[in-house]
Image (cartoon, rainbow, N blue to C red):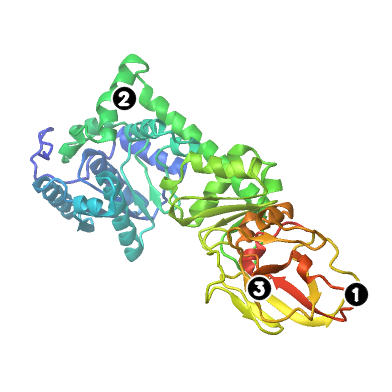
Amino acid sequence: MSLLNDRGGQPLQDLSLQKGSSSQLLARFKGFVKKHGLFSKKSSILAAVSGGPDSICLLNLLVLLSHPWALSVSVAHFDHCLRGEESRRDCEFVKAICAANSIPFFTEKAAIGKMAKEKGLCIQDMARRARYSFLERITSRHGFDLIVTAHTMDDQAEEIIFRLCRGAGPGGLSGIRLKRTDRIARPLLFARKEEILQYLYANSIPFVTDSSNLNTKYTRNKIRAHVLPVIQQKINPAAVKAIFRVGRILSEEDEAMNFMTRKALSECRCSIDSLPGEMLDTYRLRSHPAAIRKRIYRKILVSMGQSPGSLRYDHLEKIDEIVIHGRPSSWYCLPHGCMVVRNYDRLYFSSDRNLPGKTIQKTGRKEGQAIIVERPGVFMLPKDAGRVEIREDACPDFKNPPSRTFPRPLWMPASQAFPMEITYRMKGDRFQPIGMDHTVKLKKFLINRNIPRQLRDILPLLRKNSKIVAVIGVEISQYAKICDHDSKCLLVSWMPGPRASLFMPPA
């Protein structure tokens, strides 16, 4: 059960928070807020208050500071509906203490257990998401300057140990942020839980206790009940302060690394016109340390909607492997729809899986899968692969000499009888390039010509009677070579679409 504090000699109905004005804790609180610029005078503050000792202490300190600093303080309480009557009692207690001190009060409740099951989340994660969503909605609706929560130094130590055991990097090991970019501040991080309890008892300030904090089926409760006490008893009595200090150091270094990451990203970023996503120069990327490169990948993926929690170190390692050791043409698919594609000295990040080489279906010669060419003209290709143009032209002086330019125009005799078909490659395709006396596997031919894998499935082919007469943009067939007596030709060109253009090899 949740119990009201009845120590200190005051009756339970004494809910005044005008106590402790001359305390050392208030002086330290004020100094901590000023030092870190957490909020200023005349701020409008929404305090997240559960009714427990930490949040009640925070509310008390804000109330004491509200008059000299002209603060506007309001309270938000979220009922998770996880502890039955105890949850309702906590809500009524916070409502009563706000009423007794003329503090605006906001509340909301949700069946977190049911929501967690429906969304496949653990209860603690679901509770955290719902609670912060509520706080953000109230803040936006009523125009508060910031939200404050009552995390303490002990909470910070527990969080850092928890993240360390899960393999977090420097950013994660910096722990709970003192002040987040989304207007959330933690002005009680300097205080230990023990001194908070002593302060509340000394000033007869009531609070409630949450019985679920004693349930060691939750990982953080295990750390609080079993791990930290052992560390303090057997290794370092001041472990909480030491771990807190490590978090502050890593937080400062993480900020420095983030600054360097933003600068490096700006140097490596390439223009991709109107296409969604990000493109980086792999040559410039390789000039930066691995830690900066991986932060760049993470920053881009998060900005594209990838959940930070779903990004593992293995994902960043795989992307870096593509950049440093991968083949010039390679890709990697991440969870939840993001894709990273390397094409020579370019690295493309997209949340669109509809990219060449992965989602475009190979088409055969079944009805509806080939474009019938009965006369010269312009033929649009599906899936943003561009267009093919076939027009009559005078025969050039040369006869399609070998060239590594891609895509390049091709000439074939105008006497080449229509109709023909524009298709994509099929399994088992063979091709006889001009000048060769035998056919070769089309796949091998494209590899030898350095055609990126992402383009091979959308590279248009011109067929006549099942034979490939041209790999459009690459090479003409021996079957369709220009002879000396040919006076008119067909000029065949491929103009790649915007997505296909991303994967063109360098000239």
Camera-nearest label, 1 or 2 = 1
Q: Pick the residue in front: 485 or 234.
A: 485
Whether residue 413 is situated above or below residue 312 in the rendered picture:
below
Amino acid on which disc 1 is placed: Asp
Q: Pick the residue in front: 75 or 1.
A: 1
Q: Measuring from the top left, give residue 392's x and y in whole percent.
A: 79, 83
Q: Pick the residue in front: 343 or 412.
A: 412
Question: Is any part of residue 399 visible from this angle?
Answer: yes
Measuring 20% from the left and 32% from the top, which residue is drawn there?
202
Residue identifier under label 2 = 228
Measuring 37% from the left and 16% from the top, which residue is drawn there?
235
Residue identifier under label 3 = 465
Q: Pick the residue in front: 144 or 470.
A: 470
Question: In this rendering, would 311 be left or right of 479?
Answer: left
Amino acid on which disc 2 is placed: Leu
Question: In this rendering, would 289 be left or right of 309?
Answer: right
Circle 1 SS class: loop
How would you rate the neighbour count of disc 3 (Cα within 10 Å): few for under 14, some for 14-19, many for 20 or more? Answer: few
Q: Are marks 1 and 2 in contact (CB under 8 Å)?
A: no
Question: In this rendering, would 216 be left or right of 380?
Answer: left
Question: Which of the 4 image quarters holds residue 24?
Answer: top left
Circle 2 SS class: helix
Residue 38's tag is none
Q: Are marks 2 and 3 in contact (CB under 8 Å)?
A: no
How would you rate the neighbour count of disc 2 (Cα within 10 Å): few for under 14, some for 14-19, many for 20 or more? Answer: many
Q: Measuring from the top left, give residue 348's x and y in whole percent.
A: 60, 55
Residue identifier under label 1 = 484
Which badge, 1 or 3, comes first in the chain's sequence?
3
Amino acid on which disc 3 is placed: Asn
Question: In this rendering, would 196 be left or right of 493?
Answer: left
Measuring 60% from the left and 61% from the top, which residue is drawn there?
457
